[in-house]
Every structure is written in structure tokens, then in C-alpha cells.
Image (cartoon, rainbow, N blue to C red):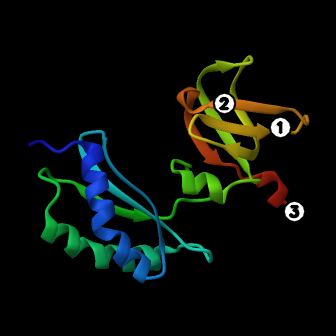
Amino acid sequence: MSKTKGNIASSVRALIAEPVEKLGYTLWDVEYVKDGPYWYLRITIDREEGVDIDDCEKVHRTIDPLIDEADPIEDPYYLEVSSPGLERELKEPWHYEKYLGRAVTAKLFSAVAGQKSYTGALEAYDAEGITLGLRSGEKQSLPFKSISKLTAYYDYESEVQ
């Protein structure tokens, strides 16, 4: 039986979720992706205080032997552990829950109401899509099937002094 990318990511997630949480981190995402000629197993961790390089190294050292022992990936790959960053991708319902009331950007496959990108407060979500509160005071509903990428929005200009 061949393993698909999604199955590999799910298998790895199940394998490492508890050890990562025991270290005090949230497992934000697990991806198994091809980038150029190489395959990458990308583990994204988070915590309230933020994540630095020492945190990534600590998690890497903990999960690397677990993944090697379970051997869920047949081909060569690179293991990466990182922070999701300020403009993190939101993929799971618990990600949406965490960002309710906060600014997000939705990039779309094709234009909805004349736009291919919307930024606004995430006001609601359900199995079908999201509702954003726009700066204009209007609300925009976007179905998940139209969204190519949903990310947290960070206003860098408000940080300029």
C-alpha cells in the first residue's frame, strides 16, 4: 500500500502530538511537501510566549528519533521544525477559533465580488466558509472552496515608530 502525502502527515501528527505537547508546545501543523527536487517534513510549533531557534532544536531532537523508529516515510526527506510566524496559515477549525475577532487575510482562487483578496476581522466560520468584518463596516462571506490561503494578518506599519 502506498502512502499519500496526507496520510504521512497524519501519521506523523499522531506520532508526535503528545511528545510535543509534553514539552509545552502546540503542534500547529504537519506537512509533507515537495519543494524543488526535495521532500520536506515540516513541523510547525507554537506557544503563547513565542518560539525561538532553541525551541525548534529542542522539539527536533525529541521527535527525530520517534519518526526514525516509526519509519512512516519511505523516501529521503528533510525534517524542519519552525514557528508558524506572525502571518501563519489557518487550516484547522481550532485555528479559526483562536483567531475569531482578529484580522486575517483570505486569498482567493478567483474573484468574489470583484476582489481576489480580503482582509478583515474573522467574525464567524462554519463547515462551509468564513465571514469577515471589513474596515468599511460591511461583512463578506467566503466559501472555503473559494479560498486558496487563509492567514493571520499582521499590520507591520503599526509597529513603525
Name the amino acid type tagged 3: Gln
Horizontal side of 119 relative to 95 (left or right) equals right
Residue 3 x %, y %: 17, 45
User: Residue under circle 3?
Assistant: 161
Quarter of the image containing the N terminus?
Answer: top left
> In the rendered structure, which disc, 3 or 1, sits on the residue that comes first in sequence?
1
Q: Secondary structure at mark 3?
A: loop
Residue 134 x %, y %: 83, 37
Name the amino acid type tagged 2: Leu
* Mark number displayed over residue 142: 2
Disc 3/disc 2 C-alpha distance (Å): 35 Å
Name the amino acid type tagged 1: Leu
Residue 26 x %, y %: 49, 70
Could you tell me if the residues under marks 3 and 1 are in contact, i.e. CB atoms within 8 Å?
A: no
Residue at 32% over, 45% down: 33
Disc 1/disc 2 C-alpha distance (Å): 12 Å
Structural crowding at the residue carrying mark 1, measured as other residues with C-alpha within 10 Å and reported as few (<14), some (14–19) or many (≥20): some
Please tell me in which quadrant of the rendered image residue 141 appears: top right
User: Residue under circle 1?
Assistant: 134
Residue at 15% over, 53% down: 76
